[in-house]
Image (tube, rainbow, N blue to C red):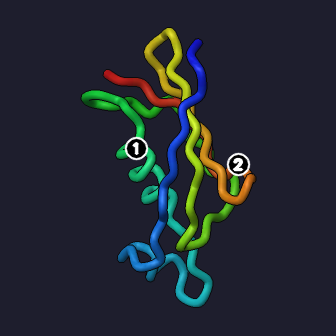
């Protein structure tokens, strides 16, 4: 296995999807977090999402820390942290 790679993902409060999730108590939709992760990770071509677990609520304006590792079988395993807490984890595969 290789070393862990690191990156950051800013989830801005002005994204259109945030307004509807939920008025008066906004959270970042999981689909938006996953979209930003896919934009950041170095996965060429079509992607198969093997697993994703959303573990904690993320508020708009969060700066997530992304850590990922490429595995020998062609998969990428990742974790996202918000202020030191794991909020999302998953495994992707390039198809």
Q: Give the class, few, some or many, for how many residues have Cα within 10 Å of label 1's Cα (few <14, many ≥20).
A: some
Q: Position of residue 43 (x, y in %)?
A: 35, 30
Drawn side of residue 47 relative to residue 71, left or right: left
Residue closest to the eye, 77 or 62: 62
Q: Position of residue 72 (x, y in %)?
A: 50, 9
Residue 56 coordinates in the image, percent (x, y): 69, 58
Q: Nearer the viewer, residue 48 or 63?
A: 63
Q: Please, is residue 47 above or below residue 32 in the view? A: above
- As helix, strand or loop, the secondary structure at mark 2 comes to strand
**Mark 2 residue crowding within 10 angstroms, few (<14) / some (14–19) / many (20+):** some
Q: Which mark is residue 86?
A: 2
Which quadrant is home to the C terminus? top left
Could you give the CA–CA distance between mark 1 and mark 2, rounded to whole angstroms?
Answer: 18 Å
Q: Earlier in the sequence, mark 1 or mark 2?
A: 1
Q: Which mark is residue 31?
A: none
Q: Position of residue 49 (x, y in %)?
A: 44, 34
Residue in the picture at 59% in, 50% down: 65
Disc 1 secondary structure class? helix
State the quadrant of the N terminus. top right
Task: Residue at 56%, 40% (x, y): give it.
Answer: 52
Q: In the rendered view, tell whether residue 7 sits above or below residue 50.
A: below
Residue 40, numbered circle: 1
- Looking at the picture, tell me which residue is in the foreground, 45 or 48: 45
Q: Residue at x 46, y 50 (%)?
A: 34
User: Of all residues shown, which one is farthest toward the bottom?
Assistant: 24
Query: Residue shown at 35%/46% (left/top)?
Result: 39
User: In which quadrant of the rendered view does residue 60 lie?
Assistant: bottom right
Count of numbered labels shown in the rendering? 2
Classify 63 as above or below 76: below
């Amino acid at each position: 296995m290789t070393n862990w790679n690191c990156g950051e993902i800013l989830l801005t409060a002005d994204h259109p999807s945030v307004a509807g999730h939920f008025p008066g108590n906004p959270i970042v939709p999981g689909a938006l977090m996953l979209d930003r992760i896919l934009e950041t990770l170095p996965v060429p071509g079509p992607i198969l999402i093997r697993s994703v677990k959303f573990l904690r609520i993320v508020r708009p304006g969060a700066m997530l820390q992304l850590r990922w590792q490429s595995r020998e079988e062609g998969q990428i395993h990742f974790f996202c942290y918000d202020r030191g807490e794991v909020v999302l984890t998953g495994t992707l595969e390039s198809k």
